[in-house]
Image: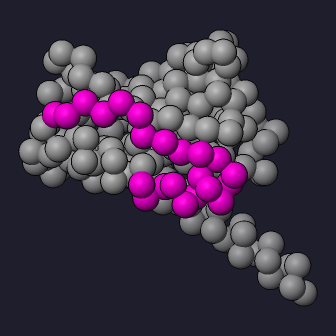
Amino acid sequence: RRVLLSLIAKESKRLNGLVQSILDLARLERAEEALNLAETDLADLVRETVESLVPAAKAAGLELTLATVASATVRVDAQLISQAISNLIVNAIRHSQSKDIVVSLEDRGKMMTVLVEDHGVGIPSEQAARIFERFHRVDPARAAETGGAGLGLAIVRRIARLHGGDATVSPAHPQGCCFAVTVAK
């Protein structure tokens, strides 16, 4: 009986997460006129977001660190940008099989770029082009094990584009991947 209750609780959480992700994406589709834009210190926002996820990384046996942090005040919806960064870090914790995750913030002229890099299993090059599509999963066989519905990265890209930027992925060296979220200054 306990096993059944545990399974029901686990699946209820997974279903709740799926519904929440679908609602988030639907809200973002009509969000352009509803963004809560404000002058925000992006360095502080990135730092706070990383600090809030350090316990989750430690619980998974990973080290989450904040590396280079360029300072910039940008006009963004801080809650959405924090959500995008969180989605990337949580994905790295769940899927990368890396021992460390490094987050950094770079000033690239007209854009600010948040990078989330791991040195885990990486993403096959044939999958990289589709990784930001809704419901796409790199390894569907691991879906039951790791959770998620393949919406997190679609949400990240939508948030970035609402802020005049984009979300991309590239290989990290020697292995792993580096996700980048850019926002206009």
Q: Per the image, is 59 magenta?
A: yes
Above or below, 1 relative to 15: below
Which image quadrant is residue 17 in? bottom right
* In-image side of 17 versus 158 (left or right): right
- Number of numbered callouts drawn: 0
Residue 92: x and y in percent read: 59, 40
* In-image side of 62 versus 64 (left or right): right
* In-image side of 33 versus 174 (left or right): left
Q: Which residues are magenta?
A: 51-72
Residue 47: x and y in percent read: 33, 47
Image point 25% across, 48% down: which residue?
44
Comparing 60 with 168, the one in front is: 60
Above or below, 19 relative to 42: below
Residue 109: x and y in percent read: 18, 15
Above or below, 69 relative to 177: below
Q: Is residue 164 visible?
A: no
Tell me how the rendering is colored.
Answer: one colour
Image point 38% across, 51% down: which residue?
49
Q: Is residue 117 visible?
A: yes
Residue 28: x and y in percent read: 32, 45
Hey, which residue is sitting farthest bottom in the picture?
Answer: 1
